[in-house]
Amino acid sequence: MKTYNCIIVGSGIAAMQLANHLSDQSRVLVITKSTRRANNSYRAQGGIAAAIGNEDSPFFHYEDTIKAGCDFHNEKEVRELVENGPALIEQLKNDGLPFDKDKIGQLALGMEGAHSRKRIVHCGGDATGKHMMEHLIASIRPTIDVIENRFVYELMIHPDSKKCIGIKAKDLDGNNEVYFSDNVVLAVGGIGGLFSFTSNDSSVAGDGVALAYRAGAEITDMEFIQFHPTLLYINGKTTGLISEAVRGEGARLIDQSGMALMKGKHLLEDLAPRHIVAKEIFHQREAGNDVYLDISRIARFEEKFPTITALCHKNGILIESGKIPVAPGCHFLMGGVAVNSVGQTSIEGLYAVGETAKTGVHGANRLASNSLLEGLYYGKKLAVHLNEQIEKIEMDVISFHPTKTSSLNTPVFPHKKEIQEKMMAYAGIIRTRTELEVLETWLSEYDHPSFIDNSLDEWSIENIQKLFMLQTAKLVVNAALLREESRGAHNREDFSVENKRWGQLHIVQSKNGTEMRERQREHTEIEIYA
């Protein structure tokens, strides 16, 4: 029986930042579904947004974040995020992270969609995530246990205290393992694997949301899912991300006849907020038209974007042609597990950081390159909080033995591909009540009430993964049906404009039901649940 002061589920930027800032006296476990490099953070191309330019300031960064997210944020959290950005970059620079520099030796600053100023710092051109993660992985102290290829399938909640006291996991052979801890942190990314078109790593499929929901935690704003406008599109499939930084360097979106797609559609044209660009590309593709990124204006493209160049070559796209075929795909979840300002959920002892958490900093549509910044900021912030809490483990784990209720017969679930295709078709970029209700009905066929509280000890990893996907999909569909407006990344064709009343409401779901929570209560309730 292994006991820890802190168990971190996941291995992305928020997880590793947290691990690196926890006290040397703490017994820490980082446990991850695949390998420590198989996550969205490692794949991140764009960079980190921070107001470090001479003509920039945290105030301007704050304004851009609020505008891109349609004023649906926790303003206090946004303000603290952007104010801490420059110091976080400075610390990484001092620690030796090799940020790209300009001709005079200053940090090179890039432009991305919905930013009013150049403020994106990069490493290796379009390989920021890789460099950042390698830096954080190399910094992990040897006394921290890192266990790979473990599927965490249950959060253990003590029946008396209702505190989260550990996790259950399965190894690749399906053997069950139990780990106890004073604090458990979910940092497993978003829900990209629920959709057939996604930029996400193949391991990312909404596990964190499902785990928290099954344990009784509150889940918030699941309707707000960002679809990145430009994924490489080949033979009816998306095969990788084409960073927004490409448009920041001057690339234009064009249709198959060469006409500029975004001209006249938004003041920022190709650098409009992501939900606006994604919707335009979706309409073009729905009408049967191909969409391309015209990169002919970008000098030394291969040098500036080596990762994208390699991706294109791998898929038979010649950079020399000056055109890259693109389509939108699921990219980022703005909703997630409800947390307070340090990442604590509505369950004692359970925390969430990174994309798994709903912190309120992204509103209805995340501003480009704020995700890595969020991971850095909240990973460190939670570590400071836990360092103040963590002492010797006093939990009586010997007297507690996880009980196992009788398992149901192995259910017959749909294939993952079917779940992904239905989510993309009926709960994707453009939504309607009719299509969402069709999906809701289909999901209900696999919604046995006993699945929530029944033991999964004897289930296969494959079936548990499908169950998690179906449960998370249901949370998305429920919220998307309830929000009768279009706001940010949530586009309802039958309610095509923002609604002032809906702009004051968060949709909060848990095993106890669904609640419409007033936004004006944020500054009081946010201190407890977010």
Image (tube, rainbow, N blue to C red):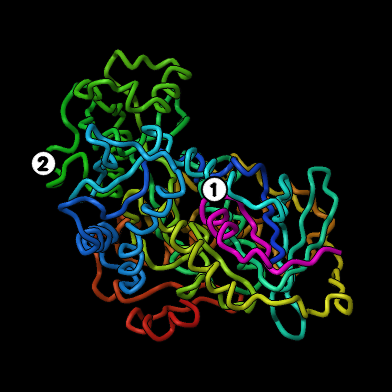
Q: In the rendered structure, does residue 529 fall within the stretch colored magenta?
A: no
The CA distance from mark 2 to mark 1 is 43 Å
Q: In screen coordinates, is 30 left or right of 104?
A: right
Residue 1 % position (x, y): 86, 64
User: Vertical placement of 144 versus 221: above or below?
Assistant: above
| Residue 371, numbered circle | none
Looking at the image, is mark 2 or mark 1 nearer the viewer?
1
In the depicted view, which residue is nearer to us: 502 or 321? 321
Read off the magenta span: 1-25
Q: Residues within 10 Å of mark 2 (few under 14, many from 20)?
A: few
The residue under the point 41% across, 54% down is: 91
Q: In the rendered structure, does residue 20 fall within the stretch colored magenta?
A: yes
Q: Residues within 10 Å of mark 1 (few under 14, many from 20)?
A: many
Residue 362 % position (x, y): 36, 61
The residue under the point 59% across, 45% down is: 137
Q: In screen coordinates, is 368 left or right of 8?
A: left
Q: Which residue is mark 2?
A: 264
| Residue 136, numbered circle | 1
Q: Give the residue type that dot 1 points to.
A: Leu
Element class at badge 2: loop
> Which comes before the other along the chain, label 2 or label 1?
1
Number of numbered discs overlaid on the protein picture: 2
Residue 119 % position (x, y): 26, 48
User: Vertical placement of 475 versus 386: above or below?
Assistant: above
Q: In screen coordinates, is 305 left or right of 466?
A: left
Q: Give the residue type that dot 2 points to.
A: Gly
In the depicted view, which residue is nearer to us: 276 or 73? 73
Q: Quadrant of residue 318?
A: top left
Q: In screen coordinates, is 192 left or right of 300?
A: right
User: Vertical placement of 512 versus 462: above or below?
Assistant: below
Residue 130 % position (x, y): 49, 38
In the depicted view, which residue is nearer to us: 329 or 150? 150
